[in-house]
Amino acid sequence: MYKTAVLGAYDSIYGFAALGVDTFPAATPGEGKARLRKLTDSGYAVIYITEALAAALPEEIERYKGRFLPALIQIPGVSGNTGAGVAGVKKSVEQAVGSDILFSEKQ
Amino acid sequence: MAVTQTTPTRMELTRLKKKLVTAVRGHKLLKDKRDELMRQFLDLAKENMELRKAVEEGIRKANANFVTAKASMPEEALHTALMAPKQEVYLEAERKNVMSVEIPVFEYRTRTADPNDIYSYGFAFTSGDLDDAVRSLADVLPQMLELAEKEKACQLLAAEIEKTRRRVNALEHVMIPETRESIRYITMKLDENERSSQIRLLKVKDMMLKEILGTP
């Protein structure tokens, strides 16, 4: 039995608490990093992380990419969509195919 | 090339021939694996992208609703309202094997079946906008979980494809040509040895004939 979590600035994530997703506000990247490490060891299968926080912790995101669990999923925060999530999908395509053949023309 | 390191013996030749057969078969299998992984990956990536766009749009709308809600009620009241959630989301993660890559399949359950348990507050002191905001976010949640599943699968498949592609290339461009070259070298060397011993025998025969016939 796994749980889900949301990590990011308080204003971007507080709504998720109502749905039963555990929210963990992190104001600074350092705090976010420590929290993320703790979460990955304590039974969270899906951790949503705001794009703003994820941008500050690229090496942490990369660390969990090859693992079966947890799934770190970037979501846009309240301040707007930075396009990092879409860029992540494109990066996967690039890694697999060698170049982005699926979404490059739709830019 | 590695030709200089091979000892030109028959045993080595047999060994190399066996190695070549294995390498060619492995190459074919890995190539098939790569193609199938790629086919599955491309479908998955398209789904992933569509889902992501839907989820991002949903979250954008929900965030806008939350901003409205925040504007129409005191911040303390808002925080208090969301402090003790009634609902909880649990996930069951199963492993699905796609061409020897394990990808997760999530199945989610909520603690209570009542869809109205997302409203963890009394309605007297909160604005109606908060209800809308929570509702709009709850509508995106199933899609978000699906996105998590698809995106993780995409990442795992992409890593596996990269690995497989490297293996295929290593076999195709390094292993197989090198083994072929070594086999060619040993065959030539053995043939050459055979010819030289043949000639040696002919020469010895000539010498012996000369001795017997006693030509001056």
Image (cartoon, rainbow, N blue to C red):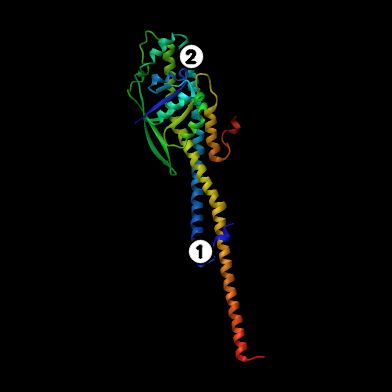
Res A90 quadrant in image:
top right
Judging depth in this view, the residue of B106 and A61 nearest the camera is A61
Res B80 quadrant in image:
top left
Q: Position of residue B159 (x, y in %)?
A: 49, 40
Amino acid type for the residue under numbered disc 2: Val
> Residue at the location (40% across, 20% down)?
A17
What secondary structure is marked by label 1?
helix
**Chain that bears disc 2:** B
What secondary structure is marked by label 2?
helix
> Residue at the location (48% across, 12% down)?
B68
**Residue B180 relative to residue A37: left or right:** right
Q: Position of residue B41 (x, y in %)?
A: 50, 39
Q: State the quadrant of the C terminus of chain B.
A: bottom right
Amino acid type for the residue under numbered disc 1: Glu
Q: Position of residue B192 (x, y in %)?
A: 59, 70
**Residue B168 relative to residue B101: left or right:** right
Of marks 2 and 1, which one's residue comes earlier in the chain? Answer: 1
Q: Is residue B71 visible?
A: yes
At label 1, counting other C-alpha atoms closer than 10 Å, the crowd grade (few under 14, some 14-19, many 20 or more) is some
Judging depth in this view, the residue of B44 and A66 nearest the camera is A66
On residue B67, the disc is 2
At label 2, counting other C-alpha atoms closer than 10 Å, the crowd grade (few under 14, some 14-19, many 20 or more) is some
Residue at the right extreme of this rendering = B216
Q: State the quadrant of the N terminus of chain B.
A: bottom right
Q: How many labels does the image show?
A: 2
* Relative vertical location of residue A67 with respect to residue A76 in this rendering, above or below: below
**Chain that bears disc 1:** B
Q: Mark 1 points at which residue?
A: B12
On residue A68, the disc is none
